[in-house]
């Protein structure tokens, strides 16, 4: 369970109106870099879930990083350095 903060009363109202619905939230997270466990989250926006086929979501996730990883010689070594 993660207890989240909300950025404004307007966001809290939108969450309340959608209490028993699936929603998408965006905001700022803080996590432990050793485990990637989210320890704090502040919700800035709330929107309806946009249903898409799973393979489309996966393709979007792959494209989200752009070509930034192309410049990293050894991604595994890089990630191990970030996590330590």
Image (cartoon, helix red, strand yellow):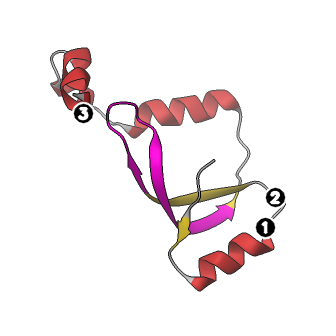
Please report the bounds of the magenta region as a residue range: 29-47
Spatial CA distance of label 2 from label 1 is 5 Å
Residue 83, numbered circle:
none
Q: Which residue is mark 2?
A: 21
Q: Which residue is mark 3?
A: 68
Name the secondary structure under disc 2.
loop
Point out residue 83 in the picture as x, y percentages from the top left corner: 26, 29
The answer to whether the residue labelled 2 contacts the one labelled 1, judged by CB atoms less than 8 Å apart, is yes
Q: Quadrant of residue 3?
A: bottom right
Q: Tag 2 or tag 3, which sits nearer the N-term?
A: 2
Q: Quadrant of residue 29?
A: bottom left
Q: Residue at x 70, y 40 (%)?
A: 52
Give the vertical position of 26 relative to 77 (above or below).
Answer: below
Q: Which residue is mark 1?
A: 18
Q: Residue at x 76, y 54 (%)?
A: 22
Side (left or right) of 76 relative to 60: left
Classify mark 3: residues with Cα within 10 Å, few (<14), some (14-19) or many (20+).
few
In this view, the residue in front, 30 or 50, is 30
Classify mark 1: residues with Cα within 10 Å, few (<14), some (14-19) or many (20+).
few
Q: Tag 1 or tag 3, which sits nearer the N-term?
A: 1
Q: Quadrant of residue 82?
A: top left
């Amino acid at each position: 369970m993660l207890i989240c903060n909300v950025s404004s009363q307007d966001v809290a109202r939108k969450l309340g109106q959608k209490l028993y619905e699936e929603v998408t939230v965006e905001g700022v997270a803080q996590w432990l870099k050793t485990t990637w466990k989210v320890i704090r989250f502040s919700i800035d926006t709330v929107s309806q879930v946009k249903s898409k086929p799973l393979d489309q979501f996966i393709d979007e996730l792959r494209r989200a990083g752009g070509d930034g990883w192309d410049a990293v010689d050894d991604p595994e070594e890089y990630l191990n350095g970030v996590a330590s």
